Amino acid sequence: MSMSIELREIKLLSNEITPLVIEAESEGHRFVRRLQDDWDEGKNRFQGTGEFLLSVYLDGTLTALGGLNKDPYLNTEGIGRLRHVYVSPSVRHQGIGGLLVNRIIEQAAQTFLILRLRTTTTGAATFYEKLGFERTNEDAATHILHLRAQSRL
């Protein structure tokens, strides 16, 4: 049985993400709710240069999301931050997260030289390391990835 997988850029965040918010919170993660709150308050709508928020639909159901911002923890050009990546537990280990993050990396390389992120779980750390991220002791980041930016500047 084949699955239909579709990646979409989110331009308007709807209550469609509510099931992911609830799932994430049940796992002890507050960052999906923070994504929704920041969007609703206009604090972060992924509208800066090179920024975007992606969703992954599996057979028409929203199952994952993640975005890219200019790193808000650094006042340095060329550094992006992987933000709010979440994959529903029901579809983990099926390649959905890898597909999502690899698409973010691919698009990030057009604008940014470096990608940073912070994770608090060993499972997520292992996942990012398999995708090429390296551990770092930098402030406000646990992992970093050097990109070969093809900047359009």
Image (tube, helix red, strand yellow):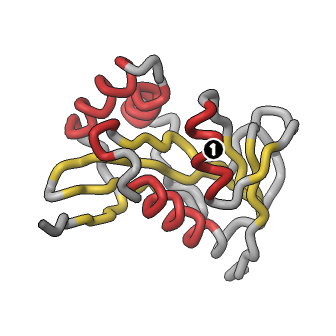
Label 1: element kind: helix
Q: Quadrant of residue 2?
A: bottom left
- At 55% from the left edge and 58% from the top edge, which residue is drawn? 51
Considering only vertical position in the picture, is 135 above or below 89? below
- In the picture, measured across the screen, residue 41 lies left or right of residue 104, that is left
For label 1, the crowd category at 10 Å Cα-Cα, with few meaning under 14, some 14 to 19 and many 20 or more, is: few
- At 47% from the left edge and 23% from the top edge, which residue is drawn? 29
How far across and down, in percent of the image, does residue 3 sit?
18, 64
- At 68% from the left edge and 55% from the top edge, which residue is drawn? 80
How far across and down, in percent of the image, does residue 109 sit?
66, 72
Considering only vertical position in the picture, is 18 above or below 57? above
Q: Which residue is mark 1?
A: 126
- Type of the residue with mark 1: Thr
- At 37% from the left edge and 45% from the top edge, which residue is drawn? 92
Locate the N terminus by quadrant. Answer: bottom left
Q: Nearer the viewer, residue 43 or 114?
A: 114
Q: Nearer the viewer, residue 52 or 24?
A: 24
How many numbered discs, if any?
A: 1
How far across and down, in percent of the image, does residue 108 sit?
61, 66
Locate the C terminus by quadrant. Answer: bottom right
